[in-house]
Every structure is written in C-alpha cells, then in structure tokens.
Image (tube, rainbow, N blue to C red):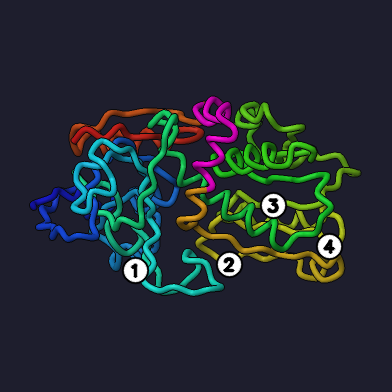
C-alpha cells in the first residue's frame, strides 16, 4: 500500500514522500487523530540543531506524540475503530534489568526514523495501547505524561521515604504534567513549583505554592526535586536545587540540553544528593499514564488547560502554520490530523 510520509526536508520545508508499506501479520494500521508538537521538533523545524545533526537525520517525518484509530489488524486483536495511543520507543532487544527506553539499541520515532506525520502508520502491535473515556485532544498528551511517569517510577525506586516537600523546577508543559502527577500520587506532600514566568505559574492552581526563581524565601527547603527546565537554563536550575534540597535528597533530571551544563558537584557530595537521569518512556509508562486518567478522571480538565492551540491539518500549509504558531505558544500546540 502506498502511504504518504510528510517529512521535514530542510528547516521550514516540509514535503511529501510516497512510501510502499509492506503489511505483515505483526503490523496494525493506525490512522492518526491528533498529534502534539514538542520543543525538540521546533529545533528541527527552525533549524536550531547542529547542521551535522540535521544533515544526518533529515529528511524525516516529525512528531512522536500521537493518538489514532485502528483501521486494520490482520490478527483481529484490535477491532477497527479502536482508539489507541502510539508508543514512539521501538526496542529491538530485551533486558531483564534495563528498561526499553534506556537500551542503546532501541529506536525512537522522529529521531532517526519517521515519526507520526503520516497518512496512516504501520505500528508493531506491541507498540499501541487502547484508551477509553478520554478526549482525543487530551489523550494526545499521554506521551508527555508517560515521560513523567517514567521519572516518578525512577524516583520511587531510588529516593528515601521522607517526601514531605517536593519541588518542581520549570513552568512549561513538562513541569506542569510532572507536578500534577506528583500532587495526585503524593496527596500528603507539599508540591512547590519554581519558574521564570509569572503568567505560566498562574496555571499551576493544583500546586501548594509557586515561586519565581529569584523570589524564593531563604529558609525554604525541599526533600526532593524535579528538573523540568532543559537547555542552558537547566544549569542554574540544578544548582538552585542543590542549594535548597535537604541532605540525601534526590534530584530527578528531566530537561534535555544540547550542551553540557556545569553543576556544583562539591555540594552534591557534601549533601549526599542522588542525581537521577530520566529520558523518554516505554510501554509500562504509557500503561501507567492511562491508568492515571482512570484513577484521576478530573486530571483531564487540568491537562486541557495547557493546550494553547488546536489546528486542523488538511495540507502542508497547515502543518507549517502549526509549527509557526507553536513557536509563540506558552504550552502545547496540537494538530487535528485530517490529511
């Protein structure tokens, strides 16, 4: 079957490639319903990645956050019309200890091979999970939620039991979802959000407190911290965490930076701080994110608030419009996929 892959050819230039897809018994054909743009693809679209990286990875279909509807399953395990979230991480190996998203051999959609900007997507059947009773426009945030779920699982495994005050640095989409999940899963803990934009901080109504990073009380302390900043800003954020955190606390690192950042390792040693690296997510994290919706259905209302724009996509012009609009949005831009 001939399928259309909408690929970024060069910065701000999207084209169509016609691909002859081979159907086999282990593939399920899914038509995307919604896709969500993340900061990583803005860097591709705007040409803000290293030219060598762009030359190596382009042309490529962008987007790794998507939900869709099953069109065909040769085995009949997924009925046509079933709504599913598509998992971008694609492992080729299995390890009894190392999670799939940390295996160096794993592939990831829209990072080395095509993402979900396609007319239909031929998915491995183990890479989709049905969801129910969730609005599609909110369900498209499941990938973002799964990343936070992965970090929280890691936090549970390696942090000590004193969890009275949890700090989240970053007032963007990752910080919002992470702090919401923490507040629901640790209802007795105080969740405090630290950010640089007072307007964004107003969205965090479920948090116990919010602070601009230059207005933090001198005596404020947290037991554990989550870094959701990324970029060069993560350096100052991590060092502020090191200053504020109580001894033997953990810092969950979630923000991605293109360049190395310098941190105060002396105080990491003196305080016995544990640094936890977190990246992407796997099947179990997506399943946990879906269960989160089931356990806390009211969370849909909170998550809907960070959808800054919804743009219906009929053409490449609409795709470019979505990326341009996303570059000035506070939170998430989602695309209703009707190509």
- Left or right of residue 93: residue 208: right
State the CA–CA distance, disc 4 to disc 2: 24 Å
**Residue 266, above or below 159:** below
The answer to which of marks 3 and 4 sits earlier in the sequence is 3
Q: Position of residue 135 (x, y in %)?
A: 41, 28
The answer to which of marks 4 and 1 sits earlier in the sequence is 1
Q: Residue furthest right?
A: 219
3 and 2 marks in contact (CB < 8 Å): no
Specify the label residue 52 is tagged with.
1
Q: Which residue is mark 2?
A: 260
Which residue is at the front of the view, 260 or 150? 150
- Left or right of residue 191: residue 337: left
Q: Position of residue 45 (x, y in %)?
A: 33, 49
State the CA–CA distance, disc 3 to disc 2: 14 Å
**Residue 300, above or below 97:** above
Q: Which residue is mark 4?
A: 248
Which residue occupies 49% across, 74% down? 95
Discs 3/1, front: 3
Secondary structure beneath disc 4? loop
**Residue 170 position by quadrant:** top right
């Amino acid at each position: 079957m001939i399928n259309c892959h909408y690929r970024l050819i060069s910065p701000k230039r999207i084209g169509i490639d016609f691909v002859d897809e081979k159907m086999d018994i282990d593939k399920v054909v899914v038509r995307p319903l919604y896709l969500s743009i993340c900061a990583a693809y803005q860097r591709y679209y705007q040409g803000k990645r290293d030219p060598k990286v762009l030359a190596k990875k382009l042309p490529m279909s962008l987007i790794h956050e998507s939900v869709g509807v099953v069109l065909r399953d040769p085995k009949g395990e997924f009925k046509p019309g079933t709504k599913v979230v598509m998992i971008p991480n694609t492992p080729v190996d299995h390890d009894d200890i190392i999670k799939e998203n940390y295996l160096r051999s794993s592939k990831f959609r829209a990072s080395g091979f095509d993402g979900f900007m396609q007319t239909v997507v031929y998915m491995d059947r183990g890479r989709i999970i049905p969801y129910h009773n969730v609005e599609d426009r909110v369900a498209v945030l499941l990938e973002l939620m799964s990343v936070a779920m992965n970090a929280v699982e890691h936090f549970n495994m390696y942090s000590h039991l004193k969890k009275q005050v949890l700090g989240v640095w970053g007032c963007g989409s990752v910080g919002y979802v992470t702090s919401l999940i923490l507040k629901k899963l640790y209802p007795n803990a105080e969740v405090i959000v630290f950010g640089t934009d007072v307007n964004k901080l107003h969205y965090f109504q479920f948090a116990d407190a919010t602070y601009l990073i230059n207005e933090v009380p001198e005596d404020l302390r947290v037991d554990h911290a989550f870094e959701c900043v990324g970029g060069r800003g993560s350096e100052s954020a991590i060092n502020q965490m090191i200053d504020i955190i109580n001894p033997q606390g953990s810092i969950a690192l979630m923000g991605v930076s293109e360049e190395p950042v310098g941190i105060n390792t002396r105080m990491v040693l003196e305080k016995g701080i544990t640094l936890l690296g977190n990246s992407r997510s796997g099947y179990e994290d997506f399943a946990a994110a879906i269960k989160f919706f089931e356990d806390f259905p009211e969370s849909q209302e909170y998550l809907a608030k960070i959808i800054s724009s919804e743009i219906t996509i009929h053409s490449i012009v609409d795709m470019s419009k979505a990326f341009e609009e996303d570059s000035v949005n506070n939170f998430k831009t989602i695309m209703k996929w009707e190509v």
